[in-house]
Image (spheres, grey):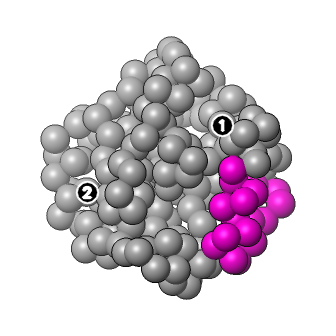
């Protein structure tokens, strides 16, 4: 991947609080995707942007899943707490997300629909607990048809703290 000398954005959605990890519910002070995003930021020097829904998702895992499923089923585009004014200065967008309902969280749909990704390269990175990227690549492509979609990285959420070497290899690949 050729990111050297290019302006990079690391835009990510992450959920702290109660999360499903290795078959059980655990409390994460920092979400898995945020941990990966910060590693990518340190390695690339890119700008970090945390995509957050205006209505904060509950701390409780089951409540969050219920809301995420309703958003997906009803195709709700949650309002964002804040957004970037302009992404035109960026060449590469590292797009990070957990696999929710088999794809990107609906707040990511809002973010992607709010911006023009023409002539940008998007490198997706997805945290999950066994479901991989699901149909997220197809959805990202449909939302950003004029962007080039680079090779994705999948990270098992329960191993994200040890993912630096995998991220480094992905960035070199």
- The verdict on residue 62 being magenta is yes
Residue 62 visible somewhere in the drawing: yes
Q: Establish if 102 lies above or below 129.
A: above
Does 152 sit left or right of 70 as displayed?
Answer: left
Residue 120 visible somewhere in the drawing: no
Q: Establish if 160 lies above or below 115.
A: below
Work out which quarter of the rendered image holds the N terminus and state it: top left
Work out which quarter of the rendered image holds the C terminus and state it: top left
- The verdict on residue 34 being magenta is no
Callout 1: 10 Å neighbours few (<14), some, many (20+)? some
Q: Cα distance, mark 2 to mark 1?
A: 24 Å
Of 116 and 18, the residue lying toward us: 18
SS assignment at label 1? helix
Does 65 sit left or right of 42 as displayed?
Answer: right
Q: Establish if 37 lies above or below 107.
A: below
SS assignment at label 2? helix
The stretch in magenta equals: 52-69
Of 84 and 132, the residue lying toward us: 132
Callout 2: 10 Å neighbours few (<14), some, many (20+)? many
Kindly identify which residue carries mark 2: 167
- The residue lying at 32 percent from left, 51 percent from top is 154
- The residue lying at 53 percent from left, 29 percent from top is 139
Of 92 and 156, the residue lying toward us: 156
Single out the mark in the foreground, 2 or 1: 1
Residue that lies at the very extreme toward the top in this rendered image: 146
Residue 143 - label: none
Residue 112 x/y as whole percent? 63, 33
Q: Which quadrant would residue 64 be assigned to in this image? A: bottom right
Kindly identify which residue carries mark 1: 109
Q: Establish if 30 lies above or below 103.
A: below
Q: Which quadrant would residue 152 be assigned to in this image? A: top left
Residue 108 x/y as whole percent? 63, 43
């Amino acid at each position: 991947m050729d990111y050297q000398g290019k302006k990079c954005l690391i835009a990510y959605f992450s959920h702290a609080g109660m999360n499903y990890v290795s078959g059980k519910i655990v409390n994460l002070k920092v979400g898995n995707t945020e941990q990966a995003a910060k590693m990518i930021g340190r390695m690339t020097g890119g700008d970090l942007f945390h995509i957050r829904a205006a209505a904060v998702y509950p701390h409780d895992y089951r409540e969050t899943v219920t809301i995420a499923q309703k958003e997906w089923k009803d195709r709700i585009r949650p309002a964002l707490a804040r957004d970037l004014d302009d992404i035109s200065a960026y060449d590469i967008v590292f797009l990070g997300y957990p696999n929710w309902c088999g794809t990107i969280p609906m707040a990511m749909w809002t973010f992607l629909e709010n911006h023009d990704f023409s002539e940008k390269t998007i490198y997706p990175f997805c945290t999950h607990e066994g479901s991989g990227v699901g149909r997220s690549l197809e959805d990202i492509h449909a939302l950003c048809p004029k962007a080039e979609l680079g090779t994705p990285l999948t990270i098992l959420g329960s191993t994200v703290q040890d993912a630096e070497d995998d991220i480094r290899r992905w960035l070199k690949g």
